Image (tube, rainbow, N blue to C red):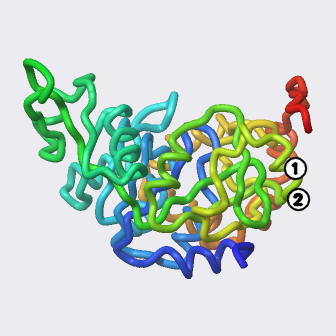
């Protein structure tokens, strides 16, 4: 049975020392799963992600990580990820940096079973001076060199989606990041879901099914799992909290107080959401904006 509570999925599929990929680009970031990893005290993780966001700042602060693999690091639209940056500068955290294209190319190689893939240089010339994983090989079809990056095959990918059936066939809409590539590249896939829906709903719109159930190991019904990021059609991005985190993260004491109150001090995402209160709920509420129905026809 794939349907299970999130704590059970994290306990069963995330082990100390694993490489964990939390997918989602600005949108659908799996904060609830990250908080559960903190609550369970997982250690020595390699945290991989395009744009680590506040989630990895919090997980590094909680002592979960020994290394980060990333492309672009920052509090989006606000400033630096102070905790991750400080840990790197102090030599307390290993790191590998890629361009966005480099990171996605690594996942694509992992998803397709290839040891590496070539890519256009983009920002790779500067990055390759600091990252020996980025290499340059002779173009076998013409003159010049081609940049290549190795496959990334996380032990676990965590993906948040709008809706899925009990087998993990999942619909995503809105901004689509690297969810599909991360899921296909990973050894295990944990899905957190705003809504569990009947199979017929998923089958009614097959083009929206980015994650097929055949690669999913756990399906966890966790409404509001992406806060303070957002889930298109369900709740808005909490821009106020991104600004607030910039202030909180300036003080180690305030960071630990936040973790004690908002992560370790709540049992689960339901309690976390209730604790946020009606003012935040109202502020993040979105109005319906329905797309035009599509006629797939029938025989």
Residue at 85% across, 32% down: 296
Q: Nearer the viewer, residue 235 or 149?
A: 149
Q: Secondary structure at mark 1?
A: helix
* Furthest-front residue in this view: 299
Residue at 48% across, 74% down: 14
Q: In the rendered image, is residue 177 in sight?
A: yes
Query: x and y percent of residue 52 in the render?
Result: 44, 46
Residue at 78% across, 66% down: 166
Query: x and y percent of residue 202 in the render?
Result: 81, 50
10 Å crowding of disc 1: few (<14), some (14-19), many (20+)? few
10 Å crowding of disc 2: few (<14), some (14-19), many (20+)? few
Residue tagged 1: 201
Mark 2 and mark 1: span between their CA atoms? 6 Å
For the N terminus, the image quarter is bottom right
* Contact (Cβ within 8 Å) of mark 2 with mark 1: yes
* Furthest-top residue in this view: 143
Residue tagged 2: 198
For the C terminus, the image quarter is top right
Q: In the rendered image, is residue 267 in sight?
A: no
Relative to 200, is 157 on the left or the right?
left
Q: In the rendered image of this protein, does residue 273 appear above or below residue 116? A: below
Query: x and y percent of residue 116 in the render?
Result: 25, 46
Which numbered tag is attached to residue 2? none
- Count how many numbered circles sit on residues in the image: 2
Query: x and y percent of residue 165 in the render?
Result: 79, 60
Quarter where residue 214 is shown: bottom right
Relative to 66, is 267 on the left or the right?
right
Quarter where residue 231 is shown: top right
Q: Secondary structure at mark 2?
A: loop
Residue at 72% across, 37% down: 207
């Amino acid at each position: 049975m794939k349907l299970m509570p999130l704590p059970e999925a994290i306990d069963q599929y995330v082990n100390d020392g694993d490489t964990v990929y939390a997918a989602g680009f600005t949108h659908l970031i799996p904060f609830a799963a990250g908080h559960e990893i903190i609550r369970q005290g997982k250690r020595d993780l390699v945290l991989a992600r395009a744009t680590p966001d506040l989630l990895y700042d919090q997980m590094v602060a909680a002592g979960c990580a020994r290394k980060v693999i990333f492309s672009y690091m920052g509090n989006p639209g606000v400033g630096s990820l102070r905790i991750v940056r400080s840990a790197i500068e102090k030599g307390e955290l290993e790191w590998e940096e890629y361009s966005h294209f480099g990171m996605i190319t690594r996942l694509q190689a992992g998803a397709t079973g290839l040891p590496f893939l070539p890519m256009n240089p983009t920002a790779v010339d500067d990055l390759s001076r600091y990252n020996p994983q980025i290499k340059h090989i002779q173009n076998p079809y013409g003159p010049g060199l081609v940049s290549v990056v190795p496959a990334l095959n996380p032990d676990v990918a965590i993906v948040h989606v709008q809706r899925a059936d009990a087998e993990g066939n999942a619909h995503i809409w809105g901004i689509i990041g690297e969810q599909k590539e991360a899921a296909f590249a990973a050894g295990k896939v944990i899905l957190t879901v705003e809504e569990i829906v009947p199979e017929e709903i998923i089958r009614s719109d097959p083009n929206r099914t980015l994650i097929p159930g055949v690669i999913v190991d756990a399906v966890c019904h966790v409404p509001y799992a992406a806060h303070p990021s957002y889930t298109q059609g369900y709740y808005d991005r909490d821009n106020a909290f991104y600004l607030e985190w910039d202030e909180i993260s300036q003080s180690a004491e305030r960071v630990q107080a936040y973790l004690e109150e908002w992560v370790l001090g709540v049992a689960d995402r339901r309690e976390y959401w209730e604790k946020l209160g009606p003012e935040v709920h109202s502020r993040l509420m979105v109005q319906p904006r329905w797309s035009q129905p599509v006629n797939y026809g029938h025989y």
